[in-house]
Image (cartoon, helix red, strand yellow):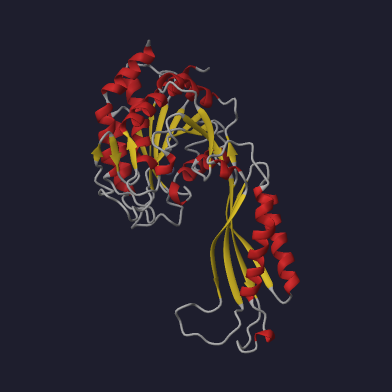
Amino acid sequence: MVEDRVLDEIDRAADEIVQLTVDLVRIPTVNPPGEEYQACASFLGERLARDGFDVEYIVASGRPEHTAAHPRVNVVGTRPGAASGPVVHLNGHIDVVPAGDGWTVDPFAGVVRDGRIFGRGVCDMKAGIAAAVFAAEGLRRAGVALPGAIEISGTVDEESGGFAGVAWLCQTGRISRGRTDYVIIPEPLNVDRICVGHRGVYWSELTMRGRVAHGSMPFLGVSAIDGMTNVLAAIRSELQPALQSRVTAMPVVPAGARHATINVNAIEGGQPIGGIQTPCVADRCRAIFDRRFLIEEGFAVAKAELDALIRRVAGAAGGLECELRDLMVVEPVQTPPESPVIGALDEAIRRVVGTTPTLIASPGTYDHKHVARIAGVPHCVAYGPGELELAHQPDEYCRVEDLVKATKVIALATLGLMRER
Ligand SMILES: [Zn+2]
């Protein structure tokens, strides 16, 4: 059986897969600000070229975050198929979040101990990139002549929205409906789970303006801080219970994130604390909200509801002006349940891991949104090695066993998708 040959090749390559992960971790692609992207893209590009890929470097030259100090360089490798079969695109982000405190090992040394690889970005998601590379390499070493092309991309800035990364590839047509059939993103979601999308995100900034007056006679002014306090109280007493009562049918994990939610990210008002204080009524207060909306709610409803609450509360106080500005909107996405990419991964997980896979949706967002919304490619999921809960934590690690299993699953799923038509 061709599948057995592929699995054997991947088992034989286990040390190489670990080494590739370690090599990637040792390039500290910390975002922000976006360090070492060029070095990491080149390293991955050279690796792909050795494995028979045609390699392109795609620079997000039109984006404001692309600078001489921190260039936004993406790499895409294509290994053509024997015929014009389906194109399977494996995408991983090369950026990692800053290490932060609390580490017991060097976060960029790539320490391998007790069957685990430690380091910042190991599970999120350099192990996933290594799995993608060796899924393709396992198929090649097993002598499989695939009818369609495999593409592997390493992209920037997923942790900060992915606008110079996957979104850029989608906007420039490198990933597009006519060209790309299936996309698998090996984010760390556990080896027996397939992630089929995420909720929507609406970030907004509320500015309230009142009227300044002497602090000894506050009744002569209108306090923007008081106005904001009333808005926050209404969010707590009215909006949050309403959101808590709404539940999505999407399988979001953890289950608490199956509800609509709102978080106050920031608040700032009146005079700067730490500066010299004068007796003044605060004439300005700002807050930033992070509203996660359900696919069943939609963005228009989420925005209108918040807007109406603010206007009602501010209007009741009198003398307050308020302005709600959109900072970021991410539409929810969901892979169609009948998508072949779900079916192919499901079958591969049953065979390699030996369990019944669970379909999940992410509590946050990831690059799926760009693939679905900009490129219009519906057949996209996230599946990869590592545990979701370890992402962004100190002593982040990925089990070698999971890394090898995920590599096998991605290889067999790719093979399955090539045979689907
Ligand atoms: Zn990630």
Residue at 35% from the left image edge and 52% from the top image edge: 30
Q: Where residue 332 sits in the image (x, y, percent)?
A: 60, 43
- In the image, ligand 1 is in what quadrant? top left
| Front residue (pair 173, 362) | 362
Q: Where residue 299 sits in the image (x, y, percent)?
A: 65, 49
Q: Is residue 24 left or right of residue 389?
A: left
- Is residue 405 depicted above or below 113 in this figure? above
Residue at 27% from the left image edge and 48% from the top image edge: 108
Q: Where residue 127 sits in the image (x, y, percent)?
A: 34, 36
Which quadrant holds the N terminus? top left
Q: Is residue 371 left or right of residue 103?
A: right
Q: Where residue 243 sits in the image (x, y, percent)?
A: 66, 50
Residue at 67% from the left image edge and 59% from the top image edge: 237
- Is residue 410 depicted above or below 211 in this figure? above
The reply to whether residue 316 is visible in this rendering is yes
| Front residue (pair 383, 129) | 383
Q: Is residue 136 left or right of residue 180?
A: left
The reply to whether residue 181 is visible in this rendering is no
